[in-house]
Image (tube, helix red, strand yellow):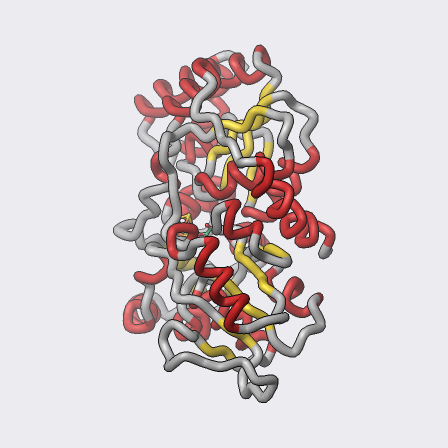
């Protein structure tokens, strides 16, 4: 699409969200990126948290971590540009060792991925021998390599249930683990917070968690929810499962970012409060102009926000930043990712 056509398309979707002069500027950039994408036989995957102009102009596929992992596994393009964070691009590389995977920012991390090391997982496995390890996709490749199976927010319950094991180690998100424990009826413990636990086959717990937290979802709390409900009694509150179990309990719906989007699309409340990265509220507002989105934009993901149209253009122009995973780690991590993808 030439810049004028991209501009018209963005204007239709984003006129209420992005000022016109910025739309002109971003449409030029998006047109340049789409041209580079064709020339370099690349696919662009865009996470639901991308800023609205990027989200609505350059990705071939948008979605949550699970959907984008599936797209990464299926692509026949030479280059995958991942408009998301490093662990997502790494997962694409794990699935595509012979393709070039680019992350359009030198460092776009994640507080959850940074919360645990491969050595931490090895120590937990030594402490709880034989207990299967489920690792959230928000981890780096060496942590995935120590795991039996990965999961995302979209399939965590299904993955845990698929193991048919009385006990599982679930890493590293304390809150997602708490929410999954609640849904699966498991009693969870956190060995880093309680006195050292000895595994002796006589456990009164069925889930072993870790102390990782998402720095964004950690900030949402029940008093804020109550305040919003007082101000807008008809508000429907939609929370990501990286929020605390108390916040999820006080909300009306919880699910992956794509599940949150679908929920808003398929229900008919006059207004919603999204407890997640605020850019997603803009993206939903653009597609659902009849619904009001209340956003808490003082809480942002500094990592996702490093991915811009400028950086994405430069990624394709200069083949940066190349994601690599050492082969001995990749093959072990691949098993955990493939096991997850095989679960519905
Ligand atoms: P989703 O898989 O639900 O898109 O979540 C990814 C993430 O990092 C949320 O903070
Ligand atoms: Fe990580 Fe939280 Fe950012 Fe998602 S929103 S990438 S979990 S820091």
Comparing 317 with 18, the one in front is 317
Q: Residue at x 51, y 37 (%)?
A: 89
- Residue that protrudes farthest toward the front in the picture: 126
104 over 146 or under it: above or below: above
Number of labels in the image equals 0
Task: Please indicate, yes or no, whether residue 326 appears anywhere in the rendered image.
Answer: yes
Give the x, y percent position of residue 290: 48, 48
Comparing 266 with 45, the one in front is 45
Kindly indicate the quadrant of the structure image that contains residue 76: top right
**Image quarter (top left, top right, bottom left or bottom right) of the C terminus:** bottom right
Give the x, y percent position of residue 184: 61, 75
**Image quarter (top left, top right, bottom left or bottom right) of the N terminus:** top right
Q: In the picture provided, is 266 more to the left or to the right than 56?
A: right
283 over 271 or under it: above or below: above
Q: Residue at x 51, y 31 (%)?
A: 324
Q: Residue at x 59, y 71 (%)?
A: 129
Comparing 324 with 256, the one in front is 324
Give the x, y percent position of residue 265: 56, 52
Task: Please indicate, yes or no, whether residue 292 appears anywhere in the rendered image.
Answer: no
154 over 282 or under it: above or below: below
């Amino acid at each position: 699409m030439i810049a004028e056509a991209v501009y018209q398309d963005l204007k239709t979707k984003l006129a209420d969200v992005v000022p016109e002069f910025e739309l002109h500027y971003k449409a030029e950039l998006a047109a340049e990126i789409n041209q580079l994408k064709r020339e370099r036989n690349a696919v662009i995957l865009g996470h639901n948290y991308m800023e609205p102009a990027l989200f609505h102009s350059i990705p071939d596929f948008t979605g949550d971590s699970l959907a984008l992992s599936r797209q990464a596994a299926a692509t026949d393009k030479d280059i995958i540009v991942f408009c998301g964070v490093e662990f997502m691009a790494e997962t694409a590389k794990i699935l595509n060792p012979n393709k070039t995977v680019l992350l359009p920012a030198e460092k776009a991390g994640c507080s959850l991925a940074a919360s645990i090391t491969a050595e931490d997982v090895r120590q937990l496995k030594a402490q709880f021998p034989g207990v299967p390890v489920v690792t959230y996709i928000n981890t780096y490749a060496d942590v995935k390599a120590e795991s039996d199976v990965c999961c995302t927010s979209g399939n965590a319950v299904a993955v845990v249930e698929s193991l048919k094991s009385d006990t599982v180690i679930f890493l590293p998100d304390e809150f997602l683990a708490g929410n999954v424990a609640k849904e699966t009826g498991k009693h969870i413990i956190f060995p880093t917070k309680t006195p050292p636990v000895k595994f002796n086959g006589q456990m009164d717990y069925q889930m072993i968690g870790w102390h990782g937290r998402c720095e964004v979802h950690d900030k949402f709390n029940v008093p804020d929810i109550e305040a919003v409900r007082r101000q807008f009694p008809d508000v429907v509150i939609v929370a990501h499962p990286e929020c605390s179990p108390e916040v999820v309990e006080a909300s009306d719906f919880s699910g992956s970012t794509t599940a949150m989007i679908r929920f808003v699309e398929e229900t008919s409340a006059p207004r919603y409060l999204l407890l997640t990265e605020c850019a997603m509220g803009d993206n939903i507002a653009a597609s659902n102009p009849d619904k009001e989105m209340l956003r808490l934009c003082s809480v942002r993901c500094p990592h996702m926000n490093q991915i811009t149209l400028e950086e994405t253009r430069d990624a394709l122009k200069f083949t940066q930043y190349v994601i690599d995973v050492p082969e001995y780690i990749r093959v072990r991590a691949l098993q955990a990712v493939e096991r997850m993808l095989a679960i519905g």
